[in-house]
Amino acid sequence: EVQLVESGGGPVQPGGPLRLSCAASGLTFSSSWMNWVRQAPGKGLEWVASISPDGTAKSYVDSVKGRFTVSRDNAENSLFLQMDSLRAEDTAVYYCVRDRGYWTFDSWGQGTLVTVSS
Amino acid sequence: QSALSQPASVSGSPGQSVTVSCTGTSTDVGGNNYVSWYQQHPGKAPKLMIYDVSNRPSGVSNRFSGSKSGNTASLTISGLQAEDEADYYCSSYGANRMFGGGTKLTVL
């Protein structure tokens, strides 16, 4: 059974940093495209970032470019999202998600809530 | 603004069938067979229900089916049950990594 477990969320002040982690099990992590998808309170799903299996290819939604960095450690089956210069509009539940190919997200973590507020 | 357009809400009575539409363009929905549908209950993570337009992952009820015509994909839920009440999102390869805006299904 695939398990994706996020951690690292919590309250943070505007302009501050936060690092999210995702521990993966039950899948061949080193062969998987991984993503972060977020959902603001009462809103829909928004893709945030993607990273290739070997970590060399990364992409981001325009609103987080230059502020967020996605990375992975295949030896530890872990995915990360370093979030800097956080804004109120970054407040959301952040999900760790596996893309099985062609933009099909077949495995989702339970999510971790990030709240940016003074 | 989502690249894929969904109705904000649909509703149906137990036992009936309901259809949720997802309208895109010839560069996404109409241009490939990689449309997916996700179900999300309140406070829970989304769950993949349909992939590649009409395929069901193992464990998903056969009451859920998907189809596509031109630039519009559809999710049909037959034999509606109370537990089907949830939000439903579509996605498509080629849609600039965007999801549909979501449809709230209410079981009357």
Image (spheres, coloured by chain):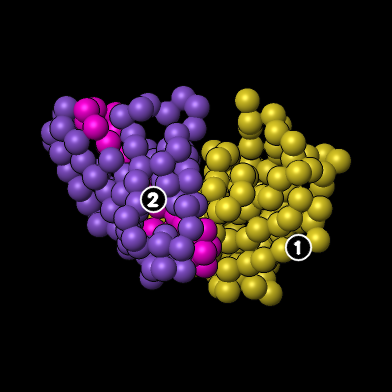
Chain colours: A yellow, B purple
**Residue behind mark 1:** A57
| Residue B14 coordinates in the image, percent (x, y) | 16, 29
| Magenta span | B77-102
Instruction: Describe the element under mark 1 as helix, strand or loop.
Output: loop
Magenta residue check for B94: yes
Instruction: Say if A97 sits above or below B7 in the image.
Output: above
Q: Chain of mark 1?
A: A
Tell whether B104 sits left or right of B29.
left
Q: Is residue A94 left or right of residue A71?
A: left
Q: Chain of mark 2?
A: B
Measured as percent of width and height from the top left, residue A7 is found at 65, 43
Q: Residues within 10 Å of mark 2 (few under 14, many from 20)?
A: many
Q: Amino acid at mark 1?
A: Ala
For disc 1, the neighbor class at 10 Å (few under 14, some 14 to 19, many from 20) is few
Q: Is residue B69 magenta?
A: no
| Discs 1 and 2 lie in a common subunit | no
Residue occupied by mark 2 = B89
State whether residue B70 is above or below residue B16.
below
- Residue at position x 71%, y 57% from top? A51
